[in-house]
Image (spheres, rainbow, N blue to C red):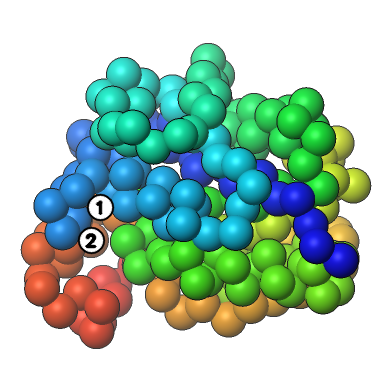
Amino acid sequence: MIARVGCAVLAAGGSRRLGHPKQLVLHRGQPLVRLAALCAWQSRAAGCALVVGAAAEPVRAALGALPFEILPNGQWTEGVAASLRVAANWAHDAGYDALLVALCDQPRLTPAHLNRLIAEHERTSLAVASRYAGKNAVPALFPKAHFKALGELRGDFGARALLNGSCPVVSVPWADGELDVDTADSERLLLDASIDQAPLPAR
């Protein structure tokens, strides 16, 4: 089955632990949010959207001319569930077969990894998650049958329950997901030219 997949990059958070917008932290000369958006745009996704909240205008501007739909999240202070609701509503209204969710703070993300998630969904018709740190997590792909459950999420727990026990999920190993930029230590690691091989910062 060839699925029509929409990819939403979540970039609405307030970066409380870091103290400044992680969406705009530079890596290889570009803001993290643009790098994540480029991965989504270069993947097999049929369409792409960016969910914005905190620092919405500079985050939006960081995309430049990339053809993304901009999805405002007026409830971004609630946590990631609010962004997932926005993304699920967009995917439903656009008529996508599945929603691929990516974050803006995983600098090792690649279009190839997103394409692996899409391919596994096409092979199995199931939800597909990236597996790292001993659990299923995002980036993850949700079939349209899950849109309603995503739209009912609340708080700052994301889709953890959906991906770890409450529904059948295919896991795709992706150790690179353990590096996310949400602390000063992880931000400093981005300055290391060997980040692709650098050890992960202690959690």
Label 1 near label 2: C-beta < 8 Å? yes
Figure quadrant of residue 57: top left
Q: Quadrant of the C terminus?
A: bottom left
Tell me the residue that label 2 is attached to: 186
Secondary structure found at label 1: loop
Mark 2: give few (<14), some (14-19) or many (20+) Cα within 10 Å. Answer: some
Q: Identify the residue at horizontal 32%, vertical 61% (top origin).
A: 107
Residue 46 can be seen in this image: yes
Tell me the residue that label 1 is attached to: 183
Secondary structure found at label 2: helix
Q: Quadrant of the N terminus?
A: bottom right
Q: Please provide percent x and percent y for residue 102.
A: 52, 52
Q: Please provide percent x and percent y for residue 192.
A: 10, 71
Q: Please provide percent x and percent y for residue 141.
A: 69, 57
Q: Identify the residue at horizontal 13%, vertical 52% (top origin).
A: 29
User: 58 and 132: which one is in front?
Assistant: 58
